[in-house]
Image: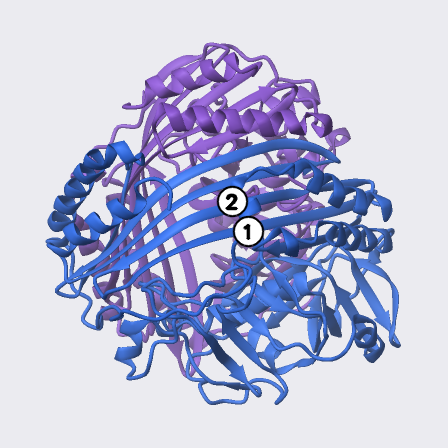
Amino acid sequence: MVYEDLADWAIKYAQKLGATYAEARLEETKGQDFVLKNGTLEGSSFSSTSGLGIRLAVNGSMGFISTNIMNKEKVEETVRHAIKLASASARMADKLILSDEKTQKKNYQIKEKIKLGDVNPEKKIGLLTEIEKQILATKVKVPGRFLHINDWKTHKYIVNTAGSKISSTLPYLNFFYLLTVLNNKQTAQRMWQYGSAGGWELTGKWKLPELLASEVKTLNIALEKGTSPPKGSVDLVVSPQVTGIIAHESCGHPYEADRIMGREAAQAGESFITTDMIGKAIAKPVVTLVDDPTRPETYGFYLYDDECVKARKKFLVKDGIITEFLQNRETASFFGTKSNGASRASEYDKEPLVRMSNTFFLEGDYSEEELIKEVKLGVFMKSFMEWNIDDKRYNNRYVGSECYLIENGEIKTPVKNPVIELTTPTLYGAIDALANNTEFHAASCGKGEPMQGIPVTHGGPSIRIRGVKLG
Amino acid sequence: MKSNLREIAEYARKKLAEVADDVVLAAVAGQASQIKFANNKIVKTAIENTFDISAFVTKDKKILITNIKDMPTEKSEVSAAKKKVDESSKNIKKFLKFVQPKPDFFGIASGPFKYKKIPRLFDKKIANFDLNEVDFVQAGMNAALNEGAERTNGIFQLNAADAILLTSGNVDIESQATSAYFSIRALIEKDASGHMNSNARTLRDIEVEESGRFAGEIARQAKHPESGKAGKYDVLFAPLAFSVIAQNFGEAASIFDVEANLSFFKNKLGEQLGQKSLNIYDDATIAGGIASCEYDAEGVPTGKIPIIHNGVLKTYLYNTSSAKKYKTKTTGNAGLIAPGPHNVVFEAGTDSRESLIKEIKHGLYITNVWYLRYQNMSTGDFSVIPRDGMFLIENGKIAGPVKQLRVSENMLNILKNIHALGDDLKQMAGWETSIPVLTPHVIVKNVNITQPTN
């Protein structure tokens, strides 16, 4: 990378001015972006950025600087300013201690079978127009068709004063859609996202034109034939899309150690999980949840985190027992443990925080049909639209999009917008069986102030949740 | 103007005009400082420096947006910077070949325009970054602790930027902007918290101690909450809470959202959507307004645009091109791709917060909300979760704190059921409020509240 020398020099300069630790993260990103709204190409863009983020410890206080003005004079001036501010803050600062970690030196990358940079913009726009064509060919009334595709490649170089040096090159492809289907003066909306580290070959797997055509047909049938969901206590079978959002919202987030120690309380919130809950049961023994950044072809893939710590698979819940939190070097020091490589920043100009990567339920032995077969009265929730959760990750809500009534073990008519509104312990305690049909879905996860949206994957198999009162 | 910003921007406009029909060039040199605190300690300080040049170009109705990276910024580096522009111009020409035209694009604004100065948008003290930011943090924190808070968390941020906007439509304007942001959440024990933000463009207007006091007071009153009960309530929303919902009234007015079926205001122009006393504006001319600016993204002078006037939806928000499409005039709300609101402003009422509480027989006082998500943006069905202090109101009095409830509602219902507005207009922007909103305390009648099954 062009500015590696500048990054190397910057940490030495910070040390010279009194920093006891410094780490520089250099990022160069190139990308393209296209939006098709109701068949019209609203905008196209290509962009290229480079920037440097430096974290430094001075007088026990943590300072962070960032700049995209890539010259020594500006970096020098900014480091001086940062050291002045960090020194002034020392009287009120929390004593910054980072866990000791092994020195790492590595260069890694994801290989694209079809390089995103080699794909003509016409082809990328062509994919959007093909999707548009297939949607219109269904003859379903779809007055709102918002399609967005973007790709980017980031070269990253991280160096710290402990001697670690990590270089990586990661390409990403992302597709987002939001559709409005109209039938008999009623509308239904659906949005979803496909994203992964990788090249243009991903589009072959995603089969987006067929997928979106099928989606509008399904939404149309639900509008035409959908009935109200059953009242009272019923069983639920939810598909991997719903399983994934549950894994992300009510397992991944509350197991972030910086939430548990209160560092992110102002905005992202805290956690209903406390340190003394390690070793306690949160679910039946059939439930195991992991966070694994090393899984290839995912949106949350990486092999070394933004503090140069080697990434690994973490078991957050194993056989129903809470086992591990997501840690970076700061939280690991606080909890008296080692980092498990969960530190990431969305861009060069943001501080690394504890983040999820690919968070999912491990699958069971059943088929989805077998889960459904054992339900007398219930709902199969295949997809969802509205969802939210409180800032301690305790009060969940998921509102179904494509959903069906289950009667005596069989899928029946569509049902409209069933609402799951449960506390996390109730939800996890009610999961009694998991299928063997794991899927992974992409999302952008928000945390931090300033806000950092970061690519993640969540997923798992279809799961059965017993005895739920639907809203 | 520091550095070589103007010289480079002028060269870029000239150079890009050789390959394009329309050019809008925005150059910004910015600086920011930030202090983040958690559990009564400073956990991070940050300094940011940026220099960005972005370009919007059109050719035969083809639209392209790009930026120019690694721009040399020093006076001595002008020739290197010009080379960067030349390179970018070549790339734009090449890329435009692949792009399809947008048939309903009708060009950018033609100037020159005259602009009216808006007071209190710039503060030299902020721009010089020669302050003791830690003192502000300490003052806000102490105010919360004095109210009984055990822990305080939040952020104090200062921003300054020099900007220049040049277009092929004879727009040439320079501006200097500053802002200050203080956000504090006070916490007591496991379940009690209060939150307040202060947003300002000058140090004179930032309210760190008042914010700390309010957050601390709410946290103290929120101690030992009981589980709330689902049902219909008259809800008094505090400004921080209501801003999260109310920003959607501005966003839904964008003609881009209306066209994309992402707006509950579609086909509602001229309809009575709220009480006759309800007035909501988009106002970019408010003195000290967070998004106040004399001009929009294509250089058109901004104004005070009535979105809801006497309860009736009066207009959508347009840029020059979309206005031409609908045979109307731009409202000064470019967004070059999607028009959007600047500051969403509610006309205040005359009642104090205490008088509003007295008006409610059976209700809730919600001081903050988060995580608003739609089931359907075209119908306005959504839910959002109260956080921080939430209180039951019985017979005009606060009866005690409650927890674990959710507002499960519809945006048009909320608008229709706005019953009374307080006299305490506050400017809100932050984590959950990306579009700045000026709102007082607001009573919304008959709000649907749900709760989780334990």
| Separation (CA) of disc 2 from disc 1 | 6 Å
Residue flagged by tag 1: what amino acid is it? Asp
At horizontal 52% and vertical 61% (from top left) the residue drawn is B435
At horizontal 47% and vertical 57% (from top left) the residue drawn is A383
| Residue occupied by mark 2 | B127
Residue flagged by tag 2: what amino acid is it? Ala
Of the 4 image quadrants, the one containing the N terminus of chain A is top left
Q: Which mark is residue B123?
A: 1
**Residue A288: percent from the left, percent from the top?**
59, 34
The answer to whether residue B366 is seen in the rendering is yes
For disc 2, the chain is B
**Residue A144: percent from the left, percent from the top?**
35, 70
Quadrant of the rendered image containing residue A377? bottom right
**Residue B342: percent from the left, percent from the top?**
47, 65
At horizontal 25% and vertical 46% (from top left) the residue drawn is B7
Residue A72 placement, left or right of A130: right
**Residue A171: percent from the left, percent from the top?**
30, 35
Q: Are marks 2 and 1 in contact (CB under 8 Å)?
A: yes
For disc 1, the chain is B
Q: Nearer the viewer, residue B356 or A41?
A: B356
